[in-house]
Each structure stands twice: as C-alpha cells, then as structure tokens.
Image: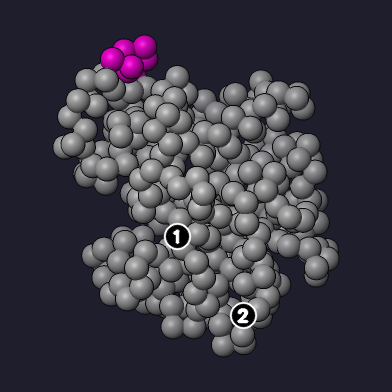
Amino acid sequence: MTQPEPKGSGWNVEPNVNRVVCAIDSNMVHALAVLCCSLTHTAKKPFHLTVGFLEGTLTENEREYLGNVFSALRVSADFLNLANDDRFITQGHISPTTFAKFLLSDAIPQQHVWIDADTVALDGWDCIFDEIRSATKDQKLVVARRGKPGNTPSKSDPFSLPFNAGVLGWPEGERIDWQAPLAAMDVLETQEQHLFNVLYANDAKWVSEKFNTLTYRVDLLDRNNLPHIVHYAGAHKPWHLPRRLQEHCLTYDCPWALWFQAENDFMDFARRNGLLAVTEQYQSLAMGSGRIRWGRDNSGYQLLRLLQALGPLAQPVIRILSIGRRWIPRGTHPVH
C-alpha cells in the first residue's frame, strides 16, 4: 500500500499540468538532481514531479536536499513513501526500487510519464505528453521501441525485449493487474522489464526510440539529430567516472558527454543558488555507489572503480589501454 508523505502536494496537480514520476533510493540522489535540472532547462512548459521511494531507502536529509533543489529550480514536487514487498528483489546492479514504477502507476491513475533517474533530458522530451494524450482507449501504455522492430523476447536475454521500461507514458485510466503475474513469475534477469513487456507489449502505443535511447545503441552522437531522452542503463554510469577523466568523453562526443554537460550545468546552478557544498557531497557519494560484481556485464563498472583507485595514474593507464581499443567493446567509457 502506498503511503503519501504528509507534506505531499501531488494529489492536487492541475489536470493540464504535465506530470513526471520517478523513484529513487539513496544511491540516486545526485542522478535525480541532474535529471531534474535537464528536464527543467529543456521543458516547453512547467511540470510537476512526483518522487517515490520504498520505505527506508531515502533519508529525511536526502529528501530535504532534493526539496531545496526542486524549489531553486522552481519545480513543483512531492514525495511518495511506498511500502516495500518481499517480491521486490535485488538483481545485479538493479535495486528493488525499480519495482516502484508498478506501485506509482497504481497510485497515480492520471496521465503521467515515468522516467528512470539514470537518464538525461534533451530538447523535445516533453513531446511525449502529446503522444500520451493521443493514445486510444486500447493503448494502455506509451513506450519507445528498442532498436529494430520485430525482436523476439527471450527469457535469457533482456536486450531482446521489445521495449525498455525506463520511460513509460501512462494514459489516464485503470492499470493492468501486475501483482498476480509477478507472484506467479519465475525469477528472471531484469524481472520488472519482462513483466512490463508481458503485460503491455500487445496493448502499447509505440513511439520513436528517441524518447528512450539506450546508450549501447549510440556510439558517436549526431549533433543534428539528438535523442529526446538518453538512458544510461547498465551497471556502470557516467557518475562513476572520476571527473578529471570526463574530457575523454567530451572530446570523443560519446553519449556520456551529454550527461557530463548536464551535470556541469547543474553544478553551475548549484553554485549560484548556494547548494554547491552539499551537492559536491552527493556527487562524491554517487561516484562511490554500486558494488563490484564479476561477469562481462560488469566489466565497465570494474574499469571505472579501478580508475577511481588509480587517482592521477588513471590518465596514463587510459592512454595505454587506448592503444588496444580495437579489442575493447565499443562504447567502453572513457576508453573509446
């Protein structure tokens, strides 16, 4: 059962106000602040933000800091405390918070867009509200197709699923029951991704991949045709990279460059609004977040933790690794 925060104002959002919904835990405070700044700077009109969190995963101090950020950005916002559930499991780098999108879609029957916090917004992102408003009664969810159409879902390969659940456009109306299917579902990799595809793939409105562009789909950016929302899915995130090394991404113009540009904009904003000192603390905590795991999918995160540990020696190590970049998986940051 969801439990609204006493000071929450989200239930009084005007019908004509665009509503953005997300959920985070303590590891994603800095990422959400950067995302919210990018949303604000590129939105065509004001929006309301609802931030959900599972009980005990976001402290009062973290909510107070984010509230100060939202206030400085002049973003109307509320927090929604959500009851945890034993079925919400940790899977690799994916925390139980990812299941909060089911709880929030039930709690908010009005139209809204869910956006994962490991994203950055660019011009045109809020055009998705036009797509949500024009959805038919039979179209229960607005999603961006992943890659080429016609992918065949595979239980062993989450990347084969038709859509990624990082950006979800919810038309107004009753949601499909998810609790019974989740209880009956085998434990799979990226459990909530599979469940969303099972429940909604046949009743979805499909929109451009530009509304949820996964970074593994992009190498160099086309500055004349940028995505609307870039999604940094996977275990290793831009904020895990020591900032002294971000120039490698900015020079190469990879998708991570967009996140660093958004973060730099936010840090400038924090400086102007007296929030820089505490923001730098959350930036540092974000860089150290995550946990080292073994396997190919976690090799990028292992590299970033190594670069953190090396300190000033990281620069020459990157130059040495770059000699063999042909044998390094494409998109490995910051060794391009």
Q: What stretch is highlighted in magenta?
A: 309-316
Classify residue 90 as left or right of residue 3. Answer: left
Of marks 2 and 1, the one in the foreground:
2
Q: Does the magenta stretch include residue 81?
A: no
Provide residue 247's location: percent of width, then percent of height. Answer: 44, 25
Classify residue 326 as left or right of residue 190. Answer: left
Residue furthest front as drawn: 224
The N terminus lies in which quarter of the figure?
bottom right
Establish if 281 lies above or below 138.
above
Q: Residues within 10 Å of mark 1 (few under 14, many from 20)?
A: some
Instruction: Check if mark 2's residue and mark 1's residue have beta carbons within 8 Å.
Output: no
In this view, the residue in front, 318 or 280, is 318
Q: Secondary structure beneath disc 1?
A: loop
The C terminus lies in which quarter of the figure?
top left
Identified at 35% across, 45% down, the residue is 219
Identified at 42% across, 29% down, the residue is 251
In this view, the residue in front, 60 or 102, is 102
Establish if 135 lies above or below 257.
below
Say which amino acid is labelled 1: Phe
Residue 63's label in the rendered image is none
Query: Exactly how many numbered labels are in the figure?
Result: 2
Which image quadrant is residue 304 in? top left
Query: According to the image, label 1 marks what residue?
Result: 88
Provide residue 39's location: percent of width, then percent of height. Answer: 65, 48
Q: Secondary structure beneath disc 2?
A: loop
Residue 135's label in the rendered image is 2
Say which amino acid is labelled 2: Ala
Which image quadrant is residue 145 in? bottom left
Tell me the CA gap for discs 2 and 1: 30 Å
